[in-house]
Amino acid sequence: MTTPDLDAYWMPFTSNRQFKKSPRLLTRADGMFFTDDRGRQILDGIAGLWCVNAGHNRPRIVKAIQEQAAELDFAPPFQMGHPKAFELASRLAKLAPEGMNKVFFTNSGSESVETALKMALAYHRVRGEGQRTRLIGRERGYHGVNFGGMSVGGMVANRKMFGTLLAGVDHIRHTHDLARNAFSVGQPAHGADLADDLERLVALHDASTIAAVIVEPVAGSSGVLIPPQGYLQRLREICDRHGILLIFDEVITGFGRTGNAFGAQTFGVTPDLMTVAKGLTNGCVPMGAVFARQSVHDTFMTGPEHLIEFFHGYTYSAHPLACAAGLATLDTYEEEGLLTRASELQGYFAEQLHSLKGEPHVIDVRNIGLVGGIELTPRAGEPTKRAFDTFLDCWEQGVLIRTTGDILALSPPLIAAREDLDRMIGAIRTALRRLA
Ligand SMILES: Cc1ncc(COP(=O)(O)O)c(C=O)c1O
């Protein structure tokens, strides 16, 4: 295949100059594999970008999108509806943690986060506590790239270029603790007490100024940080004590990644608002959503009935193609038991991942469900380079992994066979052994 002109496209979150010297072009995908422009089969170790949970090119989903495009290509989402939007919301509400039965549609994880933050602010205002304007995130959190999500996020490279961000945001400490928790299998034992950091911010700002706390149950993009045992429970208790809404950002953990439909169910903690995207449509059509507790939703349902209750939404909220893809995705997950498959595979996956302990440069391995993180010692004076070289080496071996800083991440499609997992780990082992 001839390579297209690569000049005009400014690629997102990419080292553009390196890429354009040595492009990695994907041309097809099926099941666990991409095909690249050299005709090679590339094993997908990261479900595309944590999104293709049912694997690629699933016939039911493809057909649903094709048919929907011909039947109803667009329907305005403001003051109008179409049946599949309601059907999808009802199906999602049935999968959600108990009581989170209202669903607001967006087009991405970032938009879901902005929506949830705005819902939290507006909720308090409608209740007559409009002074609760402060939003609390967590260090090393990733909540997308828009101004709200970036502000509550805690990844320095994503923040430092972009000015002063939102006012009135603060952060609790992250939970990463190599000294006490390195090589933990599943949830680490130490660190529930880190949730108490929220009490520090309550003491500093006063609870009456705080609207919401947002965390990822498992931080993915900042390097696969698994919540310590008891940590999320403690955060929930503190939020309850102070009337603060708890938002779980489940953009990565949603739709089966941790062994249940949602991380909230795996960890046994129900938030007030929950953001999702990615696996909602198996990555096929952009779509996100915010789940809200009935009580949060009902707070808005006051005033004259002809008035709009929440001044927020997107032209493409509940887009017909996305709804059709979402419904077919849920069918596929249900037919194949994919939402709980990670709980069946996680023991084997953990064994394989943790067999990397002792390989060159490996200072931690961590896992939950079908998510794995392998942390490497950075090369002196060249942070991130060792992990990036490992990624390039795996790519040459025909395996796609992901890196963040000096951490390697694996999040295979939930259809992965044991041999696929073996091959991913094998490629990483080979790369680590031959790289300086
Ligand atoms: C936890 C979390 N929130 C939000 C986002 C942003 O999603 P999107 O890239 O769809 O805007 C991501 C993306 O990886 C994510 O992991």
Image (tube, rainbow, N blue to C red):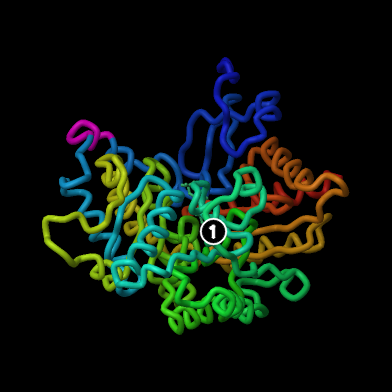
Coordinates of residue 39 in the picture (x, y in percent): 57, 26
Give the farthest residue toward the front.
131
Residue at left offset 52%, top offset 44%: 48
Q: Quadrant of the C terminus?
A: top right
Image height of 383 relative to 268, above or below: above
Is 351 positioned to the left or the right of 239 in the image? right
Q: Is residue 351 magenta?
A: no
The residue lying toward the viewer, choosing from 124 and 39, is: 124
Query: Which image quadrant is residue 70 in?
Result: top left
Query: Which image quadrant is residue 189 in?
Result: bottom right
Coordinates of residue 330 in the picture (x, y in percent): 32, 54
Image height of 137 relative to 231, above or below: above
The residue lying toward the viewer, choosing from 185 and 242, is: 242
Residue at left offset 74%, top offset 47%: 387
Label 1 residue near ligand 1, CB within 8 Å: no
Q: Is residue 71 magenta?
A: yes
Residue at left offset 49%, top offset 74%: 267
Image height of 406 relative to 304, above or below: above
Q: Quadrant of the N terminus?
A: top right
Q: Which residues lie in the magenta part?
A: 66-73
Is 307 positioned to the left or the right of 48 in the image? left
Dot 1 corresponds to which residue? 152
Query: Which image quadrant is residue 358 in?
Result: bottom right
Is 17 positioned to the left or the right of 170 in the image? right
Crowding at label 1, few (<14), some or many (≥20) Cα neighbours within 10 Å? many
Coordinates of residue 264 in the picture (x, y in percent): 44, 70
Q: Is residue 60 visible?
A: no
Of the residues shown, which amino acid type is indicated by label 1? Answer: Val
State whether the magenta stretch is mostly helix, strand or loop: helix
Residue at left offset 75%, top offset 51%: 429
